[in-house]
Image (cartoon, rainbow, N blue to C red):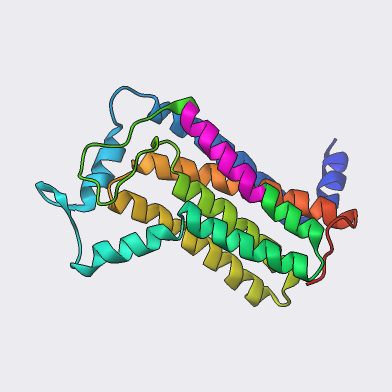
């Protein structure tokens, strides 16, 4: 039994194993957070974290210098639908110009699928926006999971993971992936700072987004092995 397990592990590449663990952890985390979202009253950690971003006793005034609010609005726009569609469209057009239709289709399916999944999850949970603090931007959609957090994870991590396969050198690959993760994290934090999402909404968006992005990355590896998607830049 142990010999068979060792033989199986020897055939599985470490990046693939790590991606599988990310998918499993993301799904588990999302299910746990969904229970928090369906509770009739906000969880204590949701309220405490949201209030930590506001001045004591003044839920309408965010912490930080005056320019911080504007900076957070700029950061949150990196996860908006219009910006992500623009980035995705530009990438797809570039791939078509260099005759990589398979990769272009993969990116389209990854991002469009993530958008569809996010909308379905919002309808399934039906959680309203938080009213604990004032909203610094206008939002009309449902709250759980955070679409900005999820779609920024889907888009930036999908593009980053695919780009890393085309780059040479471990340092360059780590830099690209770290930049994708950092952008995703900043977008999520900005949603809490602006008061339009509970922390559990953002965490759930990250869990679902990371899991979906890693599934797309695994699909890309399979397609590259089968020569459907080319492995060169």
Q: Main secondary structure of the magenta part?
A: helix
**Which residue is at a point 32% across and 36% down the rendered structure image?**
129
**Which residue is at a point 30% across and 32% down the rendered structure image?**
43
Instruction: Give the residue at the far left of this rendering.
Output: 57
Magenta range is: 110-123
Please state, as top left, top right, bottom left or bottom right, where the N terminus lies in the image. Answer: top right
Left/right placement of residue 47 relative to residue 208 reads left
Q: Nearer the viewer, residue 7 or 98?
A: 98
Above/below status of 121 relative to 60? above
| Any part of residue 28 in sight | yes
Left/right placement of residue 47 relative to residue 32 reads left
Instruction: Give the residue at the far top of this rendering.
Output: 40
Left/right placement of residue 79 relative to residue 14 reads left
In the image, residue 137 lies in the stretch drawn in magenta: no
Q: How many marks?
A: 0
Please state, as top left, top right, bottom left or bottom right, where the C terminus lies in the image. Answer: bottom right
**Which residue is at a point 45% across and 27% down the rendered structure image?**
125
Q: Quadrant of residue 26?
A: top right
Q: Nearer the viewer, residue 18 or 109?
A: 109
Above/below status of 28 relative to 83? above
| Any part of residue 18 in sight | no
**Which residue is at a point 56% across and 43% down the rendered structure image?**
115
Left/right placement of residue 159 relative to residue 197 reads right
Q: Nearer the viewer, residue 201 or 139?
A: 139
Q: Position of residue 36 (x, y in %)?
A: 39, 29
Q: Position of residue 225 (x, y in %)?
A: 88, 56
Q: Position of residue 147 (x, y in %)?
A: 47, 44
Q: Quadrant of residue 70?
A: bottom left
Q: Nearer the viewer, residue 80 or 18?
A: 80
Q: Position of residue 35 (x, y in %)?
A: 43, 26
């Amino acid at each position: 039994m142990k010999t068979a397990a060792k033989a199986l592990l020897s055939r599985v590449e470490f990046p693939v194993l790590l991606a599988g663990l990310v998918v499993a952890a993301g799904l588990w985390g999302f299910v746990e957070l969904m229970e928090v979202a369906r509770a009739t009253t906000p969880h204590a950690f949701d309220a405490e974290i949201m209030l930590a971003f506001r001045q004591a006793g003044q839920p309408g005034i965010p912490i930080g210098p005056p320019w911080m609010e504007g900076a957070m609005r700029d950061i949150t726009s990196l996860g908006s639908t219009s910006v992500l569609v623009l980035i995705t469209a530009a990438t797809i057009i570039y791939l078509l110009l260099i005759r990589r239709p398979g990769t272009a289709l993969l990116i389209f399916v990854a991002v469009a699928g993530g958008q569809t999944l996010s909308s379905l999850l919002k309808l399934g949970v039906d959680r309203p926006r938080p009213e604990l603090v004032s909203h610094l931007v206008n939002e009309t959609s449902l709250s759980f999971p955070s679409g900005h957090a999820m779609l920024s994870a889907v888009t930036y991590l999908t593009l980053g993971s695919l780009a890393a396969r085309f780059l040479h050198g471990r340092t360059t690959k780590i830099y690209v992936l770290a930049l994708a993760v950092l952008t995703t994290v900043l977008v999520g934090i900005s949603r809490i700072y602006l008061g339009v999402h509970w922390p559990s909404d953002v965490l759930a968006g990250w869990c679902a987004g990371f899991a979906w992005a890693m599934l797309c990355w695994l699909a890309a590896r399979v397609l590259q092995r089968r020569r459907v998607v080319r492995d060169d830049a």
